[in-house]
Image: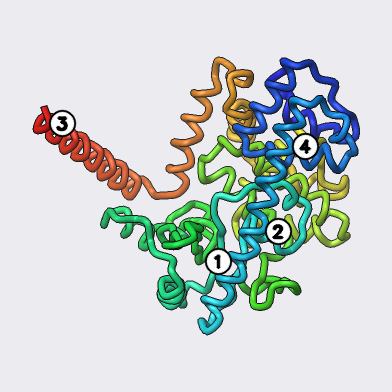
Amino acid sequence: MSADLLSGVWADPQRRPQLSSRQWETLLGQARRSALQARLAQHFVDQGWYDSTPEGPRRHLESALRMAERQRNEVVWELDCIRRALNRVDTPIVLLKGAAYLAAGLPPAPGRLFADIDIMVDRRQLQAVENALFAAGWIAQERDPYNDRYYRRWMHELPPLRHVKRGSCIDVHHTITPPTSRFAVDGSRLLERIQRVESYPKLSVLAPADMVLHSAAHLFQEGEFWHGLRDLLDLNSLLLHFGRQDTFWPDLLDRAEELGLQVPLAHALIHVERLFSTAAPSEQLDRVRALDRRPVRRWMMKWLLRSALRPEHPSCDGPFSALARGLLFVRSHWLRMPPHLLAYHLGRKALMRLQGEGAENGQRALRN
C-alpha cells in the first residue's frame, strides 16, 4: 500500500524496496512531509543501496544528506556555545531529543534534521539560565504578554529563545511534561539519573529509560503528529539499541510506573511493534500488557493513531485521517491542562484571535 510505503522501508530494513518512478515520487514526498528524507537517505547509504539508486531520486537523497550534515555541524557548534554560555550557572545541562542523540552517538542521530535544540536544567536555576543565555545573545521570541505568562506559569519550558545573530533556537525545559499535565513528571527525579557525555564537557543526557519515556510522552501528549512517524522511528532505534542491555526492559517498565508514564509507553510500544515488529522480551510481555488496563481506551487510541501517525501526504490521507488528528489534538490539550484551566486558555486564545482579526480589518479599511 502506498500509505505504508515509507514505514515499510524500516519494517523490513534488509529488503531493498523495488520502486517505480511514481512510487519514488510518493516515497520522497512522504519522507519530506515526515522530516525523514535525510534519514531515508542515510538508510540507503548504510544498506549499500545508495550508489545504485536511480539518478533522479538519488539527487534528492544527496541534497537531504548535505542538509543533514550542515545542520549537524551547526548543532555541534551551538552545543559548545550553550556550554560556554552556561558554564558559570550551577545546573546540569541535559540535552533532549535530537541534540541528545547526536551528542551521545545514538542510532537516531544520523540523518536527523533539527528545528531547534532542547535542553533541560534545574528548575531552581531557570532565571539564571535565561539571564546567561540572554547575555550570550539568545532572546525570547514571544511578544504577547499572555503567551509569555502561559509558558512561565503552566508549561514545562521557557518561551523559545532565538539567537540575535545566528538565528539558532533553544527550548529550555525544567522537566519533560507540563506541570498541569495528567502525566506530570518532577524534573528533579530525572536529574538524579542523568549521564554525562564524555565528548561534551558539562553536558549530559537522560538515562536510557527516561530518554525512551520522554520520546513517548512527547509524541502522545503534544499532539504534533505530522512528525509522528519520525518519533516512532526514533523510539524503535532506541529500543533496539538499549534493549541489548539485560536490565533495560525491566528498568523501563519500573521507571514508567515510578513516573506515571505507563499509558504513553503503552501506546508507543503498540505502534512500534505494529510498524517495525519490535517487541519487548517474552518474559516482560505480561507487564507490557498491564501498562494500560482500559481495553476500550486502548482500542480507540490504536484506531486513531493508525491514521494519525501516517505522513501528512495525499497518498496517506484516508477518510478518517483529518478526524483522527483533530480528535488527538483535542486530547493532547485535555491531557495537558485540567478542565477549568483549559477552558480559560482556549477562551482567551479565541478572544485574542478575534481582536487580531478586528485590528486587521480596521487597518484594511483605513488603507481602502
Image location of residue 153, percent across then percent down: 36, 62
Disc 4 marks which residue? 273
Q: Residue at x 73, y 61 (%)?
A: 208
> In whole angstroms, how far apart are the C-alphas of marks 1 and 3?
44 Å
* Label disc, if present, on residue 364 of the rendered structure: 3
Q: Residues within 10 Å of mark 1 (few under 14, many from 20)?
A: many
Disc 1 marks which residue? 120
> In whole angstroms, how far apart are the C-alphas of marks 3 and 4?
54 Å
The kind of residue tagged 1 is Met
Image location of residue 239, percent across then percent down: 78, 50
In the rendered view, would you say 345 is above or below 300? Answer: below
Q: Which circle's residue, 4 or 2, is located before the other in the chain?
A: 2
The quarter of the picture where the C terminus appears is: top left
In the rendered view, would you say 351 is above or below 260? Answer: above
Image quarter for residue 35? top right
Q: Residue at x 76, y 44 (%)?
A: 236
